[in-house]
Image (cartoon, helix red, strand yellow):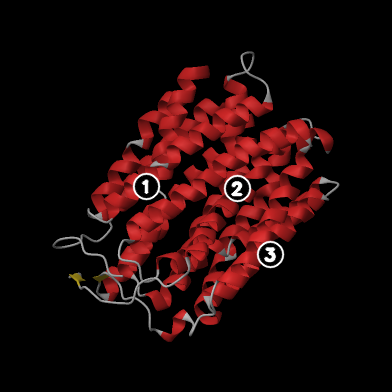
Amino acid sequence: MPENTLAVTPPNVFPRVVNVLLNLAHAIDHMFLLIFATAVATIAVEFGFASWADLMPYSVGAFALFGLGALPAGRLGDLWGRRVMMVIFFFGMGASAILVAFTQNAWQLAAALTLLGAFAAIYHPVGIPMLVQNVPNPGAVIGLNGLVGNLGIALAAVLTGFMIKWFGWRAAFAVPGLISIVCGIIFAIKCPPEAHSPSKGRGAKAAVRLTPALLIRAFAVMTAAAATSSILFNFTTNGNSQLLSERFLGLIEDPAVLGMLLGAIYAIASFAQIVVGNLIDRMRIKPLQIWVSLLQIPFLIIAAHTQQWAMFAALLGVMIFVFGSIPFTDAMIVRYVDDRLRSRVAGMRLTVAFGISSAAVWMLGPTVKAIGFDKALWVMAGIAAVKAAIVFWLPDEPGPVKNVV
């Protein structure tokens, strides 16, 4: 049976600017991966494609490497130290985004986006464990981190729309790339060297101690749940721009205005992570995660059958609960896994989950082209139901909830 234990460890000792940059890195991670999804229609025209749906599969390498690269990134984070990996993240993201801006055809674009995905893989298994190490309220910290990450998604929609309108799609990659490099310089200067790598085993212990069999079960559930969540996340965040364009056709067609509408959805929905993160510190994860999963279903179905502002409201509901699901997996890792292993466990989980969910990006264009957004959204509702069923297998937590710092 699981057993709750309470450990005492020193507080997080990073300077404030380092914590700010670790959160900002989450925004950079998601923003850079979704610039293409917002700009794809414009790029398709320049590269001679008849439709955005035909160019969309060329981005699958970015999302595949985003998943596959998490395993080696997590291992290196535990063995080399998280600071050095985050420096590599900032500089790698910046350089690869600038490289995307210089591409001249679809295959060059695919290669540059794949490189971008490889560097993007570093953040989740390294940056989040670095941020939550030795904090007394990991759920709240993860929730705030998720909010900032999803504000990056909102910024991708808004900034890319205006960049396309004023300067062209290349600037939408190049300008954020330069900003990432500047952040990397500041991080390298301000973040103190680590006294030892996490693998030395001197960090925080798991909040809930599970038997080996239950730990394997928990890992299997969190990986399967993360895979289904990632499919929903990738489908919506990569497809919402085109969904809005389709459903507002004839009413709103300005890419900057559509980008602002989508950015508003993401910005509002992002605050769900603050709410969920604080609830995680006070409640058991299993029933909370089940309800958040189930509440995605009606909004997906409504979005499938509505137009214009009614669809806008339904899509807002969808994204509130899609984003609200994000803190759960990282919170489970903190609750069940010692700090010395967190980056590696997160890396293994992300490799499986994001590797599977990258298929959602590859299939997005062909699926929508074949069956339309209405039927595709019904498929997503079915996936949300499957996720809720998976979470039922998560081990129960006995006694009052306690967090280990």
Q: Kindly report which numbered mark, 2 or 1, lies closer to the viewer in this rendering.
A: 1
Tag 2 near tag 3, CB within 8 Å: no
Q: CA distance from mark 3 to mark 1?
A: 29 Å
Q: Is residue 101 among what the camera can see?
A: yes
User: In the rendered image of this protein, does residue 267 appear above or below residue 13?
Assistant: above
Which quadrant would the C terminus be assigned to in this image? Answer: bottom left
Q: Is residue 307 visible in the rendered structure shown here?
A: no
What amino acid is at disc 1?
A: Ile
At x 66% / y 43%, what residue is drawn?
A: 35
Residue wearing tag 1: 274
Front-lying residue, 199 or 388: 199
Residue name at image x 73 percent, y 48 percent: 175
Labels 3 & 1 near each other (Cβ < 8 A): no
Secondary structure at badge 2 equals helix
Per the image, the residue denoted by label 2 is: 31
Left or right? Give the position of 331 relative to 183: left
Residue 237: image location, x then y, percent = 55, 40
* Residue in the image at 54% along x and 80% along y: 193
Determine crowd level at label 1: few under 14, some 14-19, many 20+ residues with C-alpha closer than 10 A. many
Compare marks 3 and 1 and give the one earlier in the sequence. Answer: 3
Give residue 362's mark: none
Give the residue type at disc 2.
Met
Residue bearing mark 3: 91
Q: Residues within 10 Å of mark 2 (few under 14, many from 20)?
A: many
Amino acid type of the residue that numbered disc 3 sits on in the rendered structure = Phe
Q: Earlier in the sequence, mark 2 or mark 3?
A: 2
Q: What's the distance in space between the residues labelled 2 and 1, CA to CA?
A: 19 Å
Q: Residue furthest left?
A: 399
Q: Position of residue 279 (x, y in %)?
A: 27, 50
- For label 1, the SS is helix
Closest to the observer: 381 or 264? 264
- In 3D space, how far apart are the residues under numbered discs 2 and 3 (Cα atoms)? 15 Å
